[in-house]
Amino acid sequence: MIIPHRNFEVARAQLRRYVSKHRPGRIIVLIGVGGVGKTTMRWNVMRELYGRPECWGLGCIPTIEVMALLAEKAYFNSKGWAEDSFDQLFTPDISWLIRGATPSPETVKVREAIALSSAIWKDVSRNLTETQCWIKFKNVARDRALNLYSLEHASALCINHKDTSPAHHIINLMSVMESAGSMALLTTIQTGTALWAGRSEIRRRMDVVWAAPYNVSDREEMRCYLSLLRTIGSRYEFRPRDLLGRLAPEIAAATAAVCGEITNLLDRAESNALDADRSQITAADIETAYYNAKDLGTLWADVESFWAAKHADKRDAVAARADKIWPTEEA
């Protein structure tokens, strides 16, 4: 379910613009802390652009999704990634299209076709090398008219054995996408900035969408947070009725003003109320639902890491570079 609020809508509109502008080999990165709604946002855009199977064409699929896994003793396995990517062209996971959606005759047909394909092509990548998987992927992706390759949990590409860097994976992906005539959309948490760290040739071919929580230290951001809090709170009963407004500062501190964290907090508070045989949430229910100090510190560390990555002294760096290259009157 989409909870409309300013930061979500701004990032969603930006993501839609980037995905709509088809540029083979281009990498789009959707980055944000857990709970800001990255998956919801991505699926919403994918459904809007590609959600009519009757327009796909025979044997075609405009987008596929792959999840990056730490499948090799908690390290990223590039061969498994290549295999999963190739398999998805034959037996795609269409959760982006059907989860939470009302079934239509078209989606029913797609599911039936995938079930039939799965019986024939299950584990089609078996016995192929990693290189063979990517070569065949490029050829089949062109035949399938693949527009967008979506990679979930892309930060997993940063966890490698010491002889491999994230840049190796990204450069390979860029080459594969360009050959296939496709773009890639990488969804990641804040540590995903390591995917392009120190490699300007990668960064120049990336469009980054920052899905931000609210910084309630800023008055305009605080107003947006309060509006979001009221929207989420409208699904619950409180005693007293203005309880949510009274506890707004504490809830911001307890959730880092992250949409999903606010929802989770109020869900836990509602559960506390129901356990006490009440339908209305009290201050005690909310306070009991807070994270402990250690978990709260982890949440805020993630948010602070996100803001540090987003800003990263950009203005100062540009100003220093301008001073260095621009001639002064004295010169």
Image (tube, rainbow, N blue to C red):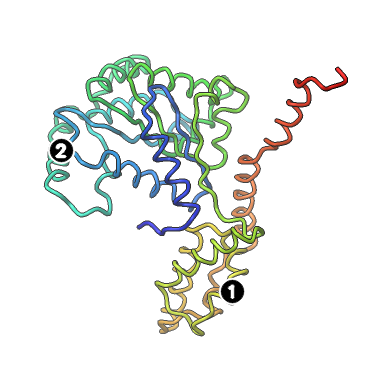
Q: Amino acid at mark 1?
A: Leu
Mark carried by residue 90: none
Which label lies toward us, 2 or 1? 2
Tell me the SS state at disc 1: loop
Q: Tell me which residue sits at (38%, 31%) in the image.
A: 21
Give the CA distance from mark 2 to mark 1: 49 Å
In the image, taking residue 163 as reference, residue 38 lies left or right, namely left
State the residue in front, 80 or 99. Answer: 99
Q: Which quarter of the picture shows residue 236?
A: bottom left
**Can you identify the residue that label 1 sits on?**
247
Picture coordinates of residue 296 (x, y %)?
61, 59
Residue 163 sits above or below residue 27 on the image:
above
Q: Which quarter of the picture shows residue 200?
A: top right
Residue 289 sits above or below residue 91 on the image:
below
Q: Amino acid at mark 2?
A: Glu
Q: In which quadrant will I find the C terminus?
A: top right
Picture coordinates of residue 58 (x, y %)?
14, 28
Picture coordinates of residue 33 (x, y %)?
53, 48
**Can you identify the residue that label 2 sits on?**
54
- Mark 2 is surrounded, within 10 Å at the Cα level, by few (under 14), some (14 to 19) or many (20 or more) other residues, namely few
Picture coordinates of residue 253 (x, y %)?
62, 63
Q: Mark 2 or mark 1: which comes first in sequence?
A: 2
Residue 70 sits above or below residue 204 on the image:
below
Residue 171 sits above or below residue 302 on the image:
above
- Mark 1 is surrounded, within 10 Å at the Cα level, by few (under 14), some (14 to 19) or many (20 or more) other residues, namely some
